[in-house]
Image (tube, grey):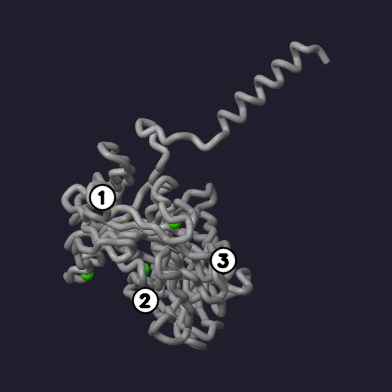
Amino acid sequence: MSKIFLASLLLFSLLFSVASAEPIPNYYKPYAPITTDKQVYSWTDKVKIIINAPSWNENKNGIDSIGDDQGYFIKLSTHGHDLEPYKLVETSQNSGVFTGEVTLTGFSHDADGDGKIDTQPRTLGSGPTSGFLEADRDDGITVSFEFADGVVLTKSAQIRWNEGIISFDKPSYLPNETARIQIIDLDMNLNPESSDTVTVEISSDSDIAGIKIDATETDEDSGVFTANLSFTSRDKSSGNRLHAIFDDKLFAKYTDHTLPSPFGIADNIEITAESVLSSNSPSADKVTLENVMLTDSSGKLVEKPVIGQQLHIAAEIKNTQDYEQPFVYLVQVTDSSGIVEALSWSKGSIAVNQKLGVSQSWSPNKPDTYNVETFVWKSIDNTLPLTSSTKSTYKITE
Ligand SMILES: [Ca+2]
Ligand SMILES: [Ca+2]
Ligand SMILES: [Ca+2]
Ligand SMILES: [Ca+2]
């Protein structure tokens, strides 16, 4: 090894050891960073503050505090309100790290649309964890600390409302399953010390009016709410049980009354999610369709239909489920070149074990060979077949 190399190595070591020694606080690049546990808060959040200030660790064998010494105050402020002085305490005897909390209390507002104010805005307390501070919707919180004479350190975080999110935990459910509905709305964590609730409106194709159920916050401070829902095909909806039958769409709706800009403070929107109640055996017939035939107006079988005759495409539908089944009976008539001559339907609902006669009329206006198809669907909007379609061919003469 050359002498020059050894010399440079020595010099480097010296420089390095100087650079890594305990630095002297430079008040213009302050050695006392303030941090908050989030960058963005909602209006009623709890804000946790940490100030790393080793030079304020005066007693290595005791818990020190900062913020309430005359001339070296800590101030917590939002646009319209502030708390000063506010004391923070050392995390352990010799840490030089100081912490505290303040709970935002928002402003007077009906957060769930029931006509009653849900907040208790107040500004009071002197730390380290007992403080309350009012905040507006589009606001910010600033922590400032007079760290040394004439040196004020500050740290700011935003305060905002959030648009809620709602979801079912699965895209479809079997009738014996329990659905879990989740709403995330950080603004409805109105009390960060206890579990809050929000209301969800649940409905199905078979129960459009539906039910309202409570969703409970997953812990005291999460802003995430869940509710469980079960299903009944025979009974009416009640409690956390929704009336729904196979292949019903399921709807969950949350109305958010705490919306971010550019919405107004008084605005609300409905946030929705959808799922489906699916059948164990999707291919199984929900009803049977029998005795499809051409009749006259008195219900007598027509064997030789002619032009201009008032014909009826009649059939019998039987419910094979153990619940009432809504349906549409749809008839389509096409001529020999595939043009649709007639299309009509009727809708109804069929009770358990009931057999129902249905028919659609058709009056042929030219001699031809026609295809007559019949379909039984759940509804015109939900064209799920409840049974197989049928197809018959009729020759119409002059
Ligand atoms: Ca100490
Ligand atoms: Ca309210
Ligand atoms: Ca809460
Ligand atoms: Ca919201």
- Disc 1, ligand 1: is the CB inside 8 Å? no
Which corner quadrant of the image does residue 222 belong to? bottom left
Percent across and percent down for residue 233 are 48, 82
- Give neighbour class at mark 1: few <14, some 14-19, many 20+ (Cα, 10 Å): many
Q: At 44% across and 52% down in the image, what residue appears?
A: 97
Tell me: residue 305, above or below residue 156: below
- Disc 2, ligand 2: is the CB inside 8 Å? no
Q: Which residue is mark 3?
A: 389
Confirm whether residue 121 shows in the render.
yes
Which corner quadrant of the image does residue 251 belong to? bottom left
- Label 1 is placed on what type of residue? Phe
Gap in Å between the C-alphas at discs 3 and 2? 40 Å
- Label 3 is placed on what type of residue? Ser
- Label 2 is placed on what type of residue? Ile
Which corner quadrant of the image does residue 238 belong to? bottom left
Gap in Å between the C-alphas at discs 2 and 1? 48 Å
Determine the secondary structure under disc 1.
strand
Tell me: residue 395, above or below residue 293: above
Q: Which numbered mark, 2 or 1, is in the foreground of this view?
A: 1
Q: Which residue is mark 2?
A: 213
Which of these two is toward me, 376 or 13? 13
Q: At 57% across and 33% down in the image, what residue appears?
A: 20
User: Along the polypeptide, which appears first: circle 3 or circle 2?
Assistant: 2
User: Along the polypeptide, which appears first: circle 3 or circle 1?
Assistant: 1
- Give neighbour class at mark 2: few <14, some 14-19, many 20+ (Cα, 10 Å): some
Q: Which numbered mark, 3 or 1, is in the foreground of this view?
A: 1
Percent across and percent down for residue 178 are 53, 76
User: Along the polypeptide, which appears first: circle 2 or circle 1?
Assistant: 1
Percent across and percent down for residue 23 are 49, 35
Confirm whether residue 362 shows in the render.
no
Q: Which residue is mark 1?
A: 73
